[in-house]
């Protein structure tokens, strides 16, 4: 098999890249180790920056998002019961969009297949080969048979646990990492959300987040121990803990019910530099991870592939390699700013084991500063709605 760009990973990064390239007449094949069913069932992020919304519109896949998604003009920060609204729209003139990554992935897969893109699901032993040469390949097996795809470029969009990043030699790649000493326990429930907008709460018992997927479907999270298992958390235990952390006023509006999804995710900050090697380009979680507290992981993946598609279009259409050569540099500048915001939100809003009294006061002062300062609130709003894409 032969194609121009071979994309490893059929998550939002790989699928959107394929769509953007297709729209410019550039061919791609996508290859994923999971089945379509598994990919379409994964529950992950829920908030799109306005720049991401515009990118999806430009790519021609925004129709259902506009029909079913919910624009939000602000969100609440809460600290031991005190609330402060971040007026995103007032500060930036823009909204964010509530639309699940699950739905976005379903939309992208449907569109790609409808337009004739080959997506190879359930592939085993996927391996990028000869990435330094001008004729790189991706090898894989399926049903016991071995295959090889020849291409000009490989896009590593295979997430944090993928194979693409390991094709960059250790002496070339530098990694930066911070692992947080807690996780997020998330539930989905078929009940209207407790509040119209998102609430990010720091409480003495730990962080809690109220989010949603629609007017009738809520997504709630609480900080938990990394030793906790999903089985340790009955629905009742979750509702009790969530109510305590949100406080009596909010909890009085809480509609509880049987959760139909419950999972624990670890929190991590991670960056790999550079994001390319030879003809291999990393995008999305394959290159970097942010803790979920700023709702940035998905948005960062979308920004990467916008930059990568632009660089590949310049290469194929104008024979201009400047953007490909600067791909890593252009992305990383933005990546580090988003890492900073996600780290800042995480530090301000969680209870850390062994936190000193001083550090607790610092968290409170951070919150009070945002409450008291228009400038500080604007900074949070600007980051949350999405920093401009410079390319
Ligand atoms: P992924 O969505 O991870 O896609 C990678 C794809 O590559 C997958 O389909 C995978 O099957 C495939 N793949 C992996 N390894 C291989 C291989 N060896 N060969 C072939 N294919 C391979 N962000 C938020 O903002 N809010 C959240 O609440 C949130 N929750 C999350 C929960 C979890 C459990 C995880 C893992 C992430 C979460 N994120 C969240 C982050 C956000 O979902 C990611 O940033 C986003 O999915 C990145 O998209 P991606 O396309 O780069 O990677
Ligand atoms: C959701 C996840 C996040 O990490 C976040 O910051 C906001 C919302 C969500 O899943 O809805």
Image: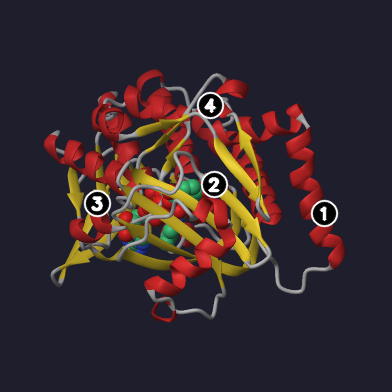
Give the CA distance from mark 2 to mark 3. 46 Å
In the picture of the structure, the residue carrying the numbered disc 4 is 322
Q: Earlier in the sequence, mark 1 or mark 4?
A: 4
Q: In this figure, which residue is indicated by the disc labeled 2? A: 199
Q: Are marks 4 and 2 in contact (CB under 8 Å)?
A: no
Residue 372 position within the rendered picture, expressed as x and y whole percent measured from the top left = 78, 34
Q: Earlier in the sequence, mark 1 or mark 2?
A: 2
Spatial separation of the CA atoms under disc 1 and disc 3? 54 Å
Q: CA distance from mark 1 to mark 2?
A: 21 Å
In this view, the residue farthest toward the right is 358
Callout 4 secondary element: helix
Using the rendered view, name the quadrant where residue 74 is placed: top right
Q: Secondary structure at mark 2?
A: strand
Cβ–Cβ under 8 Å for marks 1 and 4: no
Q: Mark 2 or mark 3, which is nearer to you? A: 2
Between the C-alphas of marks 4 and 2, the distance is 43 Å
Q: Secondary structure at mark 3?
A: strand
Work out whether mark 4 precedes mark 3 in sequence or the reverse, and give the earlier one.
3
Res. 149 mark: 3
- Comparing 254 with 32, the one in front is 254
Of the residues tagged 1 and 4, which is closer to the observer?
A: 1
Q: Residue at x 62, y 30 (%)?
A: 382
Residue ID for mark 1: 362
Q: Residues within 10 Å of mark 4 (few under 14, many from 20)?
A: few
């Amino acid at each position: 098999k032969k194609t121009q760009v071979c994309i490893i990973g059929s998550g939002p990064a790989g699928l959107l890249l394929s769509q953007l390239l297709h729209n410019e007449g550039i061919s791609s094949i996508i290859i994923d180790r999971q089945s379509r069913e598994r990919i379409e069932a994964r529950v992950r992020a829920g908030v799109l920056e306005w720049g991401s919304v515009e990118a999806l519109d430009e790519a021609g896949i925004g129709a259902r998002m506009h029909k079913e998604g919910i624009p939000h003009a602000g969100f609440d920060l809460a600290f031991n019961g005190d609330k402060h609204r971040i007026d995103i729209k007032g500060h930036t003139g823009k909204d964010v969009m509530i639309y699940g990554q699950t739905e976005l992935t379903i939309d992208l897969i449907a569109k790609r297949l409808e337009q004739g893109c080959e997506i190879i699901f359930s592939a085993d032993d996927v391996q990028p080969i000869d990435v330094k040469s001008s004729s790189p390949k991706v090898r894989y097996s399926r049903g016991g048979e071995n295959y090889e795809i020849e291409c000009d470029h490989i896009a590593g969009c295979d997430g944090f646990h993928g194979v693409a990043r390991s094709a960059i030699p250790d002496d070339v790649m530098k990694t930066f990492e911070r692992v947080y000493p807690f996780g997020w326990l998330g539930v989905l429930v078929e009940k209207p959300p407790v509040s119209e907008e998102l609430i990010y709460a720091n409480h003495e018992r730990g962080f809690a987040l109220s989010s949603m997927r629609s007017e009738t479907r809520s997504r709630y999270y609480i900080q938990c121990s990394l030793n906790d298992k999903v089985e340790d958390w009955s629905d009742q235990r979750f509702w009790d803990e969530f109510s305590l952390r949100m406080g009596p006023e909010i909890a009085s509006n809480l509609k509880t019910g049987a959760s139909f999804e419950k999972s624990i995710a670890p929190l991590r900050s991670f960056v790999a530099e550079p994001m390319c090697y030879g003809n291999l380009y990393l995008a999305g979680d394959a290159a970097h991870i942010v803790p979920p507290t700023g709702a940035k992981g998905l948005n960062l993946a979308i920004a990467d592939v916008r930059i990568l598609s632009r660089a590949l279009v310049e290469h194929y259409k104008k024979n201009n390699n400047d953007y490909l050569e600067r791909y890593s540099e252009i992305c990383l500048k933005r990546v580090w700013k988003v890492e900073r915001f996600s780290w800042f939100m995480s530090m301000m809003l969680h209870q850390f084991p062994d936190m000193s009294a001083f550090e607790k006061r610092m968290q409170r002062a951070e919150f009070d500063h945002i409450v008291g300062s228009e400038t500080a609130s604007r900074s949070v709003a600007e980051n949350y709605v999405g920093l401009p894409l410079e390319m």
